[in-house]
Image: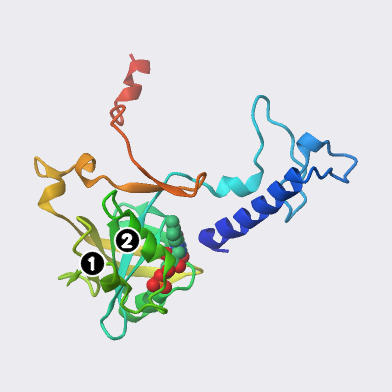
């Protein structure tokens, strides 16, 4: 099952568990104490306590929070642009990305064109980006124009580049099976305004991330250490 669908199923199970807990329900299983009782209602798995920690059960293991807020842009059959939000996404290989997708207008478009672009929602585009995750192009065909966004055809793949997002990956579909999209990044382009000394500067991009624990978006913070560097204090 797709990660994205699993998340919503898990959220529903968690809600039921929370309601039961609030109602003061006791477990009927004589082998399980109340603070050990299963939170995985699908398998009735009994959980053991982990010392000095609160167990949340397996459903929350789905959270690799924070997650990126990637914006997938495609053309439909009439060359109308569509954009959707995806948070179950990541880097798959050196030049490949992976996204867990349910069926959307976007997935129909992907199968039609074999291409898409990926941009990154930022603190200036929270409402527009969330709208792209709330509303389907099947119901609102002009959803991109509706928020006042504009697009430019990618010169490298058969997909639109959203002008309001300053950093964009142009991608070709490598595979799309069982709800898992793998795309090859053929180009990355960035607007001058997010560059410092010719390099992408996240302090200027100001991307947002999806926080599944609070079901909200967060800005990212300061640099707190050098990668492949901060740990060197233990190598000396
Ligand atoms: C925060 C957030 C994250 C989302 N992540 C995903 C995801 O990873 N995969 C997915 O299939 N849908 C995801 N969605 C739902 C789609 O963005 C949504 O169904 C959208 O309306 C599809 O648009 P389309 O039908 O125009 O393609 C997410 C929505 C939100 C608000």
Q: Earlier in the sequence, mark 2 or mark 1?
A: 2
Respond yes or no on whether mark 2 lies under 8 Å from ligand 1: no
Q: Are marks 2 and 1 in contact (CB under 8 Å)?
A: yes
The image quarter in which residue 10 lies? bottom right
Q: Residue at x 71, y 49 (%)?
A: 19
Numbered circles on residues, count? 2
Q: Quadrant of the C terminus?
A: top left
Q: Please, is residue 219 above or below residue 155 in the view? A: above
Locate the N terminus by quadrant: bottom right
Q: Is residue 146 toward the left or the right of residue 107 in the image?
A: left
Q: Quadrant of residue 8?
A: bottom right
For label 2, the residue is: 128
Point out which mark residue 149 bears: 1
18 and 98: which is toward the camera? 18
Residue drawn at x 38%, y 47% is 209
In this view, 134 is above or below 92:
below
Of the pair 12 and 76, the residue shown nearer to us = 12
Q: Is residue 205 visible?
A: yes
Q: CA distance from mark 2 to mark 1?
A: 9 Å
């Amino acid at each position: 099952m797709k990660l994205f669908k699993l998340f919503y199923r898990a959220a529903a199970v968690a809600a039921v568990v929370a309601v039961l807990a609030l109602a003061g329900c006791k477990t009927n299983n004589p082998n399980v104490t109340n603070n050990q009782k299963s939170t995985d209602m699908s398998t009735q798995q009994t959980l053991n306590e982990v010392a000095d920690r609160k167990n949340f059960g397996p459903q929350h293991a789905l959270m690799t929070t924070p997650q990126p807020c990637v914006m997938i842009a495609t053309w439909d059959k009439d060359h109308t642009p569509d954009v959707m939000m995806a948070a179950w996404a990541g880097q798959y290989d050196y030049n490949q990305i992976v996204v867990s997708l349910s069926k959307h207008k976007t997935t129909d478009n992907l199968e039609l064109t074999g291409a898409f672009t990926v941009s990154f929602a930022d603190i200036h585009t929270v409402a527009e980006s969330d709208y792209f995750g709330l509303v389907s192009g099947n119901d609102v065909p002009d959803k991109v124009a509706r928020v006042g966004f504009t697009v430019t055809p990618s010169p490298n793949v058969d997909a639109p580049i959203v002008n309001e997002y300053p950093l964009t990956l142009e991608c070709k579909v490598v595979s799309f099976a069982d709800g898992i999209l793998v795309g090859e990044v053929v180009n990355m382009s960035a607007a001058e305004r997010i560059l410092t000394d010719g390099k992408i500067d996240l302090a200027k991009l100001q991307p947002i991330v999806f926080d599944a624990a609070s079901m909200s978006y967060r800005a990212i913070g300061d640099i707190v250490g050098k990668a492949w560097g901060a740990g060197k204090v233990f190598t000396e």
